[in-house]
Amino acid sequence: EIVLTQSPGTLSLSPGEGATLSCRASQSVSSSYLAWYQQKPGQAPRLLIYGASSRATGIPDRFSGSGSGTDFTLTISRLEPEDFAVYFCQQYGSSSYSFGQGTKLEIK
Amino acid sequence: EVQLVESGGGLVQPGGSLRLSCAASGFTVSGTYMSWVRQAPGKGLEWISVIYSGGSTHYADSVKGRFTISRDNSKNTLFLQMTSLRAEDTAVYYCAREQYASGSYSYFDYWGQGTLVTVSS
């Protein structure tokens, strides 16, 4: 089973600042099968990024993804108030899926 | 419009059983990959099971042998039969549709609103 470790656990920033969230895999993950989700309290997760770097439909271009192998990054260029939420990375491999433990992005 | 609506959650005693349903609209459940993902209170997301369009199924080790995923094509509905429930199974259970193309992509593009399962005496 591939374990995804996200860092930091909590990120405190102000609106307008940029955010960098990390997702590290215990073994190599195909970039094609790496996705990022945003979750707000009481809501289901929402797809942001798939294929490590492709934005999902309707996702603003301030969200971008990058990385390969075992290291992946979600970058939010200019934080808007609605961006403060929890973010999860997720991978698929060999008929199994796993999620990172999440990074909480909070208002400073 | 794609929609997923879960139901069937509730309070159940340890060792008990429960069946969750996920009614889909806007697409055909039998023609795609469908998963169940759960989230314990205040915790992260845990994938637990998938059923592929061809009918094959896979499970996380944490539920293997206790949970069964299935679908009713005539009702366009996904199910999760849960038995031998434990306190650690307490969570919000989401169904999710997967978009998959070998070598190209795999991601969950639509999620239900979730149904809460509480295992407690």
Image (cartoon, rainbow, N blue to C red):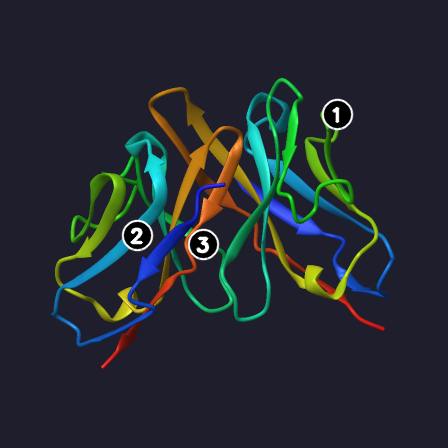
In the image, are marks 2 and 1 on the same chain? Answer: no
> Residue B114, percent across and down?
60, 56
The chain under label 2 reads A
- Which amino acid, by three-letter code, is at mark 1? Ser
Label 1 and label 3: CA atoms lie apart by: 28 Å
Tag 1 secondary structure: loop
Q: Quadrant of residue A7?
A: bottom left
User: Which residue is identified by label 3?
Assistant: A45
Q: Are marks 3 and 2 in contact (CB under 8 Å)?
A: no
Give x and y (percent) for residue A79.
Answer: 18, 66
User: Viewed as shown, does residue A85 lie left or right of B16?
Assistant: left
Residue plotted at (57% across, 55% down) = B113
When the figure is inspected, residue B72 is found, relative to residue B113, above or below; the finding is above
> Amino acid under label 2?
Cys
Identify the image quadrant of residue A39: bottom left
CA–CA distance in space, label 3 to label 2: 17 Å
Residue behind mark 1: B74
Vertical arrangement, residue A58 with respect to residue B121, above or below: above
Look at discs 1 and 3 and give the one toward the viewer: 3
Pick the front one: B62 or A86: B62
Q: Chain of mark 1?
A: B
Answer yes or no: are tags 1 and 3 on the same subunit. no
Could you tell me which chain the residue with mark 3 belongs to?
A
Estimate how packed mark 2 is, as few (under 14), some (14 to 19) or many (20 or more) residues with alpha carbons within 10 Å.
Answer: many
Name which residue type carries label 3.
Answer: Pro
Q: A59 or B43, which is in the foreground?
A: B43
Same subunit: marks 3 and 2: yes
Give how far across and how far down residue A103 sits, in percent.
Answer: 34, 64
**Which circle marks residue A23 in the picture?**
2
- Other residues around mark 3 within 10 Å, as few (<14) / some (14–19) / many (≥20): many
